[in-house]
């Protein structure tokens, strides 16, 4: 990654422009943390970069951002700039390209994200970033109240960096967050979730939760159930406990997962029927929430007589043929009863036992009457 990034710098400089790796990658490099996200800053304008890199794409011409691929690695390159007024607490209404690196760095969020690296691996630290990294503190480049007013997302980014890096917010930053929290009301719910996803998926999540509570952000982030969160390494498990399905944006798959995790918690994730109907992953997440070891759940899963319907030695045709009935809702009801009997170890997974049990269930319960009523209704 770094070797290819340095090639990008060399290509830009061979065309008579300046270029540096900037921000998180350099910060992580200094701290010995592996990073795969490389941002590059340069005094070359977007139109110049398009000429230098034929495969370049302009991500956002308004903000001077260009994407370049080299050796199948993506690099975002931005032109030095000075931002105009921020009318929506997120985006500048105008930008001005500049030729001075320090001017560009002064518009950025936190000092720890202003450190640069040149093509010779020299660290370029114009805003005392290295000192703040050594002190493990999160400090805004400019006055924090003004910084958060410029971009309200920085409030959550401050908490995210403190959580992931295990850094401390300065007193000034904390006080500014408390005074600026109202700005989060206008921040897109999608952007809130993106930052919270990163906080909640961090191994240091407890610190993120502590900061959210300490800085009085529970209400503005709709996290009323944050005190109910149990330790969980899976971010979907954290969102499940928060119960904000109707507030934050989730995919259909995420919504189903959360529903299945809740059901697994309620019905015991060690139980064969729970494992069968809600599947292994939701049950392992539920187990973590309930402090049940993953090994115990995996052992039970391996011990199950069936894991899916196709593991059963008979099929629907066998049932219809043996019972002399037609396909319909009655077959689904029979399957459910047979599955539960198998999972409760009340019958062996053999054709003879299952068909005999199916006949017994069919004739000795209300299923015959239900089948007749349904046939009469559809007829």
Image: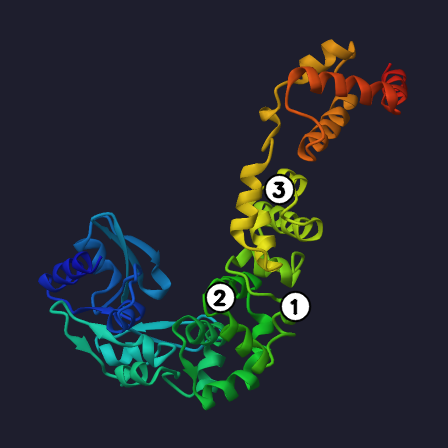
Number of residues whose C-alpha sits closer than 10 Å to that of mark 3, classed few (under 14), some (14–19) or many (20 or more)? many
Horizontal side of residue 147 vs 6, given as left or right = right
| Residue with the mark numbered 3 | 275
139 in relation to 350, above or below: below
Horizontal side of residue 311 vs 346, given as left or right = left
Please give the name of the residue rendered at 67% of the width and 39% of the height, measured from the top-left corner.
273
Separation of disc 2 and disc 3 at Cα? 32 Å
Separation of disc 2 and disc 1 at Cα? 20 Å
Number of residues whose C-alpha sits closer than 10 Å to that of mark 2, classed few (under 14), some (14–19) or many (20 or more)? some
**Number of on-image labels:** 3
Horizontal side of residue 157 vs 22, given as left or right = right
| Residue with the mark numbered 1 | 228
Disc 2 or disc 3, which is closer to the eye?
A: 3
Please give the name of the residue rendered at 42% of the width and 70% of the height, measured from the top-left corner.
164
Comparing 341 with 15, the one in front is 341
346 in relation to 270, above or below: above
312 in relation to 325, above or below: below
85 in relation to 347, above or below: below
| Residue with the mark numbered 2 | 195
Disc 1 or disc 3, which is closer to the eye?
A: 3
């Amino acid at each position: 990654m770094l070797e290819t990034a340095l090639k990008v710098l060399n290509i830009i400089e061979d065309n008579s422009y300046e270029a540096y790796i900037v921000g998180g990658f350099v910060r992580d490099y200094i701290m010995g943390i592996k990073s795969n996200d490389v941002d590059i800053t340069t005094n070359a304008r977007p139109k110049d970069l398009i000429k230098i890199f034929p495969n370049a794409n302009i991500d956002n011409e308004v903000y001077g951002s260009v994407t370049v691929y080299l050796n199948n690695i993506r690099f975002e390159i931005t032109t030095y700039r000075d931002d105009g007024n921020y009318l929506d607490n997120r985006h500048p209404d105008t930008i001005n390209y500049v030729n001075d690196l320090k001017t560009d760095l002064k518009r950025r969020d936190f000092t720890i994200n202003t450190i640069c690296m040149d093509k010779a691996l020299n660290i370029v630290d114009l805003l005392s970033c290295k000192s703040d990294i050594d002190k493990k503190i999160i400090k805004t480049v400019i006055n924090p109240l003004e910084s958060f007013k410029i971009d309200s997302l920085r409030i959550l980014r401050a908490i995210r960096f403190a959580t992931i890096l295990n850094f401390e917010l300065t007193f000034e930053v904390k006080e500014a967050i408390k005074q600026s929290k109202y700005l989060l009301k206008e921040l897109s719910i999608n952007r809130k979730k993106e930052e919270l996803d990163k906080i909640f998926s961090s191994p240091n999540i407890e610190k993120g939760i502590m900061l959210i509570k300490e800085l009085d952000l529970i209400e503005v982030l709709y996290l009323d159930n944050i005190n109910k969160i149990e330790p969980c390494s899976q971010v979907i498990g954290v969102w499940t406990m928060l119960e904000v399905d109707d507030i934050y944006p989730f995919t259909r798959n995420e919504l189903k997962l959360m529903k299945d995790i809740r059901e697994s918690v309620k019905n015991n994730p060690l139980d064969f029927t729970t494992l069968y109907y809600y599947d292994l992953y939701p049950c392992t997440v539920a187990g973590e929430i309930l402090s049940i070891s993953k090994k115990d759940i995996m052992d039970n899963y391996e011990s199950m007589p069936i894991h899916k319907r196709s593991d059963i030695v008979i099929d629907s045709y066998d049932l219809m043929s043996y019972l002399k009935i037609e396909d319909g809702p009655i077959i689904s009801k029979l399957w459910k009863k047979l599955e539960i009997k198998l999972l409760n170890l009340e019958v062996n997974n053999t054709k003879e036992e299952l068909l005999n049990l199916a006949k017994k269930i069919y004739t000795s319960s209300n299923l015959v009457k239900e089948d007749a009523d349904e046939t009469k209704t559809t007829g």
